[in-house]
Structures are given as structure tokens and as C-alpha cells.
Image: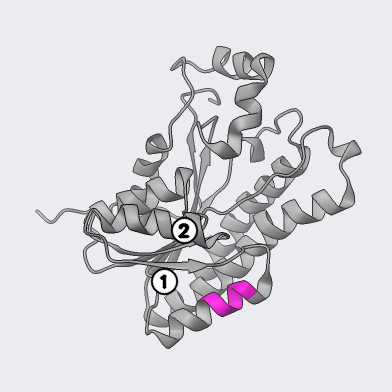
């Protein structure tokens, strides 16, 4: 029988892949046979990630792109078009959260930055990738949302709203792009990354999360990759418009 998780010959775009969950997903897709295009904001960290992937024999193209900048997204896809690269898979993972505290006390500039990157930038990236997938007759879009988009986490008001919007976007695009392109999302719980450092430093908040997690631990980036490979591959050919929660059972 054919391996339904095989991605040989596929091209995958992974945004925000210079470290953490994005890099782990890029590596997992490479391990299943895909060529990858990875993006990040900083050249140095992106090249370091690309070097790590190449050391495993990966076909990887690193492209500096800030998901909060519409012109940078346009430039990214123009470059891919010029090189004849059309992604079969797009994992839209890049995100930011420059603010912590009640949403009623969030500064406008911080709110706008969160929405620009996490929601508007994700939509623009998905729009460009989805149009190209539709033209070639196949594709899988995967958004990285969060359990806070399903159940807002105290102190992460703006971030939670942006991730809830991403879940709505997932469902809208799943309907609009069907049956050619599948669109799904992954909602991780507490994962040990630099992005989540504030929650690890707040022991009260950390213990509250772990105390409500049946598996009794926080996650690692590698805990998320299985869901990403599943949604990217033919194994999920009858799955669209869904949100897979990866949080150790905290939200049931």
C-alpha cells in the first residue's frame, strides 16, 4: 500500500520557521520528502535554520519575509513565481505578541501589530498561496492558531482575539476553496518555545495550565509536527475546515 503520509515531490511553504514550532514542522515535512521554503524576519536566524535543514539533506529555500508587511508578502510570492515554485502545502505559522495584560489596557499600536501579523498577514499569505494552489488543482493550507483562540487565556487578550479570527478564517477559506484546496488549523496549548517564555516565567500561570492538563506536562515543538504532517499529506484528504487541538488534553 502507498504511504499516505509521503510528501515526496511536494513543495511546502512554512512561515515563521527560523525556530520553534515552525522549524520543527519544516524539518518534519522534509523528513517525509517535501522540499521546503521557509520564512522569517531575520536573515541570520533564517540562514541558521536553513543550514540545519540542509545538514539533513533538505532541499530548502530561505526567504526573509515579515508577515506583518503586505509588501514583503507580495515580494515573497513574486520571487517564488519567478523561480517557478508553487507550494502544494502552506503552513502559516508566523505570529507575534508584543503585549501582555488585559485587553482593555492594550495600547492601540500593540493591538494593531498583533492583528497585522497574526490575522491580516496570515490572510494575505493564505490568499496568495491559495490562489496558486487553486490554479494548479491541489493544495493544503494549515494555519497555526492556539487554544487561546478557543478559550481566551488571561493576559493574552489581543493575541487570543487574533487567533480566534484565524479559526474563523480557516472555516471561511475551507468553504471558499473547496473542493480543490483543503484548509485546516492546529491549536497548540502551552509549548516550550521562546515565543511562550512569558508564560513559563509566570509560575502561577504555568502551574495553573499544567494543573489542568491531564498529560501533566507542557508540550515541545515536536509534539505539534504530527498534526501538521497529517494535515499536509494525503492522509487527511477528507479533512477540511477543522481545528486540531494539541494541548495534552487540557481542553476537552
Against 177, residue 204 (above or below) is: above
- Residue 224 spot, x, y in % from top left: 42, 39
Residue that extends furthest to the left in the rendered view of this protein: 1
Q: Earlier in the sequence, mark 2 or mark 1?
A: 2
Give 76 or 246, whichever is nearer the viewer: 76
**Residue drawn 39% across and 34% down?**
223
Q: CA distance from mark 2 to mark 1?
A: 31 Å
- Which residues are drawn in magenta? 72-76
Against 99, residue 15 (above or below) is: below
Residue 198 shown left or right of residue 84 in the figure: right
Give 123 or 116, whichever is nearer the viewer: 116
Badge 1 is on which residue? 180
Q: Quadrant of residue 127?
A: bottom right
- Residue 171 spot, x, y in % from top left: 58, 56
Give me the disc on residue 46.
2
Residue that extends furthest to the front in the rendered view of this protein: 44
Residue 207 visible here: yes
Amino acid at each position: 500500500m502507498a504511504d499516505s503520509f509521503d510528501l515526496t515531490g511536494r513543495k511546502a511553504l512554512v512561515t515563521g520557521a527560523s525556530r520553534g514550532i515552525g522549524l520543527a514542522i519544516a524539518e518534519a515535512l522534509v523528513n517525509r520528502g517535501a522540499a521546503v521554503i521557509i520564512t522569517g524576519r531575520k536573515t541570520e536566524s533564517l540562514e541558521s535554520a536553513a543550514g540545519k535543514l540542509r545538514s539533513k539533506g533538505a532541499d530548502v529555500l530561505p526567504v526573509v519575509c515579515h508577515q506583518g508587511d503586505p509588501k514583503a508578502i507580495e515580494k515573497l510570492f513574486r520571487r517564488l513565481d519567478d523561480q517557478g515554485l508553487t507550494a502544494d502545502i502552506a503552513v502559516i505559522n508566523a505570529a507575534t505578541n508584543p503585549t501582555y495584560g488585559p485587553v482593555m489596557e492594550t495600547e492601540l499600536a500593540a493591538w494593531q501589530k498583533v492583528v497585522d501579523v497574526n490575522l491580516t498577514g496570515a490572510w494575505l499569505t493564505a490568499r496568495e498561496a491559495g490562489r496558486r494552489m487553486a490554479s494548479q488543482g491541489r493544495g493544503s493550507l494549515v494555519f497555526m492558531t492556539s487554544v487561546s483562540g478557543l478559550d481566551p487565556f488571561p493576559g493574552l487578550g489581543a493575541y487570543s482575539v487574533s487567533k480566534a479570527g484565524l479559526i474563523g478564517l480557516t472555516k471561511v477559506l475551507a468553504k471558499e476553496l473547496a473542493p480543490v484546496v483543503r484548509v485546516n488549523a492546529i491549536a497548540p496549548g502551552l509549548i516550550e518555545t521562546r515565543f511562550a517564555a512569558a508564560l513559563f516565567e509566570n509560575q502561577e500561570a504555568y502551574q495553573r495550565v499544567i494543573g489542568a492538563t491531564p498529560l501533566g506536562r507542557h508540550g515541545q515543538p515536536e509534539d505539534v509536527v504530527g498534526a501538521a504532517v497529517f494535515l499536509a499529506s494525503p492522509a487527511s484528504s477528507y479533512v477540511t475546515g477543522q481545528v486540531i487541538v494539541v494541548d495534552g488534553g487540557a481542553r476537552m
